[in-house]
């Protein structure tokens, strides 16, 4: 399995944890972690030569509102 896939799996786990969060700070924490894992996966694909450089990443601290 590619390293980036491990990162994406971690991101998905964080997304699931966010949906089960009991409070807003916990939700926000997991969403920031999810965004960070996705950014790492994208960077790893670039480092592995699988993608080309793209636009700068959006700020990781910006958390979407809870649905």
Image (cartoon, rainbow, N blue to C red):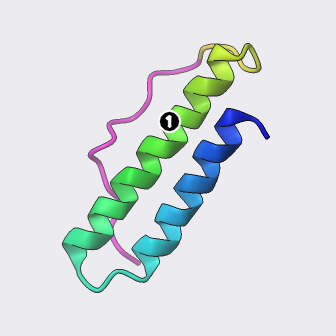
Residue labelled with disc 1: 39
Badge 1 density bin: few <14, some 14–19, many ≥20, Cα 10 Å: some
Residue 45 in the image: state x and y as whole percent: 67, 25
Q: Give yes or no for residue 64 being in the magenta stretch.
A: yes
Quarter of the image where the C terminus is located: bottom left
Q: Residue shown at 52%/73% (left/top)?
A: 16
Quadrant hosting residue 25: bottom left
Horizontal arrangement in the rendering, residue 35 relative to residue 10 (left or right): left
Horizontal arrangement in the rendering, residue 26 relative to residue 40 (left or right): left
Q: For the magenta stretch, what is the residue range?
A: 54-67
Q: Is residue 8 above or below residue 47?
A: below
Chief SS of the magenta region: loop
Q: Is residue 64 above or below residue 49?
A: below
Residue that protrudes farthest toward the left in the picture: 25
Quarter of the image where the N terminus is located: top right
Residue 27 in the image: state x and y as whole percent: 31, 71
Residue 41 in the image: state x and y as whole percent: 59, 35
Residue 46 in the image: state x and y as whole percent: 65, 18
Q: Give yes or no for residue 66 being in the magenta stretch.
A: yes
**Image label count:** 1
Q: Residue shown at 50%/36% (left/top)?
A: 39
Q: Is residue 13 above or below residue 47?
A: below
Q: Is residue 13 above or below residue 42?
A: below
Quadrant hosting residue 61: top left
Q: Residue shown at 29%/86% (left/top)?
A: 22
Residue in the foreground of this view, choosing between 55 and 44 = 44
Query: Dot 1 lies on which element?
Result: helix
Residue that protrudes farthest toward the front in the picture: 1
Q: Residue shown at 28%/61% (left/top)?
A: 29
């Amino acid at each position: 399995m590619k390293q980036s896939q491990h990162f994406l799996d971690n991101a998905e786990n964080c997304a699931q944890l966010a949906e089960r969060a009991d409070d807003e700070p916990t939700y926000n924490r997991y969403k920031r972690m999810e965004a960070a894992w996705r950014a790492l996966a994208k960077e790893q694909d670039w480092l592995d030569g699988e993608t080309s450089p793209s636009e700068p990443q959006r700020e990781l601290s910006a958390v979407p509102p809870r649905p």
